[in-house]
Image: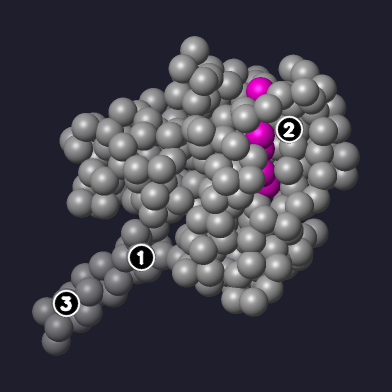
Amino acid sequence: MHQLRRVFLVVGLALLLVSCSDSPEEDFVDRMDREHEGDAPVENASQNLKKSADVTGEEVQYATVGGQEISGYLARPEGAMDAPGIIVIHEWWGLNDNIQMMTNKLAGEGYTALAVDLYNGKVAESPDSAGTYARSVDKEEALDNLTQAYGYLTEKQGANNVGVIGWCFGGAWSLNTALAHPKKIDATVIYYGRLVTDTEKLKTLEMPVLGIFGEEDGGIPPQKVKEFEAALNEVGVENTIHIYEGAGHAFANPSGMRYVEKAAEDAWQKTVRFLEQNLKGE
């Protein structure tokens, strides 16, 4: 009887440890729910961001997915023609003012930047609604959306080189876009997005990858980031990975409640240099 009781105790403890662990199969959005608990967009905080040059911005229809017209936000440097393109993918909040401002910042650095909309016009104001919207995204439709964004930049905006950048939910889709179009995308930037460590998938990538992460991010923990970096190195994909001490998830979002200014500014400078080297050849 005592032996049987001991077996049950050991099994129960093992099950408890498994249930408390952050297994690879755990839903990414569930982890984002935890990371963003109590969070909310801060109105107009991103208006303080400075651009390197004057830009023009407008709403454009760039895709039709499932019979529905999709609109995004397009920003371009004033007077520039045929600038390199960047697909900008929003966080799980949606295509809000912060993402438009970040798109303006990218345009100010000399790019034709298109902020896509994977939520079909919906913008979240709370973690609950953000989680609902993120879970509603159909993968095939999202990839179709992003593929048409690439076509819009190359065919209608004259971009010869195209990069992709995304934060959080958008960081995951930045990597997904690169994996879906490994011969087309010229540079990939991932800010604390869900990662892929399968070398069979990663070995198809032909562009350099920049990864920006926070040491205190429970959704994308440092160990997972290091596994991602090791997998890229194993298959010979050029990459630069940064993990910022004292920074958690969404630390680079100036319109959020988890903004870490010093880390965010350094990450932005690294992003600007990376894009210059790989989209402009500078």
| Tag 1 and tag 3, C-beta contact below 8 Å | no
- Range drawn in magenta: 110-115
C-alpha distance separating marks 1 and 2: 40 Å
Q: In the image, is residue 134 above or below residue 95?
A: below
The answer to whether residue 87 is visible is: no
Quadrant of residue 68 within the rendered picture: bottom right
Q: Nearer the viewer, mark 1 or mark 3?
A: 1
Nearer the N terminus, badge 1 or badge 2? Answer: 1
Q: In the image, is residue 194 above or below residue 70?
A: above
Name the secondary structure under disc 1: loop
Name the secondary structure under disc 3: helix
Q: How far across and how far down the image is residue 231, in percent?
A: 24, 40
* Residue position for label 2: 76
- Quadrant location of the N terminus in the rendered image: bottom left
C-alpha distance separating marks 1 and 3: 27 Å
Q: In the image, is residue 208 above or below residue 69?
A: above
Q: How far across and how far down the image is residue 115, in percent?
A: 67, 46
Task: Pick whichever, 116 or 63, lies toward us.
Answer: 63
* Residue position for label 3: 7
- Within 10 Å of disc 3 (Cα), the crowding (few <14, some 14-19, many 20+) is few
Nearer the N terminus, badge 1 or badge 3? Answer: 3
Q: Is residue 117 left or right of residue 191?
A: right
Q: Is residue 8 left or right of residue 117?
A: left
Q: How is the image coloured?
A: one colour
- Within 10 Å of disc 2 (Cα), the crowding (few <14, some 14-19, many 20+) is many
Q: Residue at x 22, y 79 (%)?
A: 8
* Residue position for label 1: 25
C-alpha distance separating marks 2 and 3: 66 Å
Give, as a three-letter code, the residue at label 1: Glu
Q: Residue at x 15, y 83 (%)?
A: 4
Name the secondary structure under disc 2: strand
